[in-house]
Image: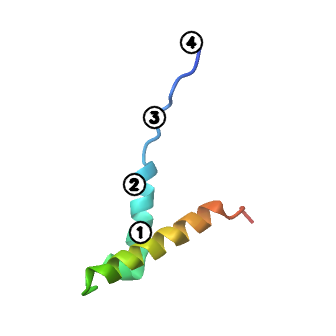
Amino acid sequence: MRGFQVIPRRAAGESTFARLGQAPRLARGFERPPEVGEAMMHAAMACIMFRRLAPAA
């Protein structure tokens, strides 16, 4: 085999959605105005990204 080969990356998106499901306020759909649920989604994604960017201790 010569050259560059793309290796399929499985479960990259699945792990992100699994982490979103662990957020307590996102696990249930009880947010009345949709904007509140959207804000909680942004906050949960920010926490996930901060964990990925932080150096491992």
User: At 38% across and 70% down in the image, what residue appears?
Assistant: 21
Left-right relation of 51 to 36: right
48 or 42: nearer the viewer: 42
Q: How far is the residue under mark 2 from the one under mark 1?
A: 10 Å
To which residue does mark 3 refer?
8
To which residue does mark 2 refer?
14
Place residue 24 in its image quadrant.
bottom left
Please report whichever mark, 2 or 1, sits nearer to the chain's N-terminal start: 2
Q: Secondary structure at mark 3?
A: loop
Q: How far is the residue under mark 4 from the one under mark 2?
A: 30 Å
User: At 64% across and 61% down in the image, what residue appears?
Assistant: 53
To which residue does mark 4 refer?
1
Looking at numbered disc 3 in the image, what kind of residue is underneath it? Pro
Place residue 27 in its image quadrant.
bottom left
Q: Dot 1: within a 10 Å radius of its alpha carbon, few (fewer than 14), some, or many (20 or more) residues?
A: some
Q: Secondary structure at mark 1?
A: helix
Farthest residue toward the top? 2
Q: Indicate the position of residue 1 as horizontal and vertical percent values.
A: 56, 12
Looking at numbered disc 2 in the image, what kind of residue is underneath it? Glu
Check residue 55 in the rendering and tell me which mark sits there, or answer none.
none
To which residue does mark 1 refer?
20
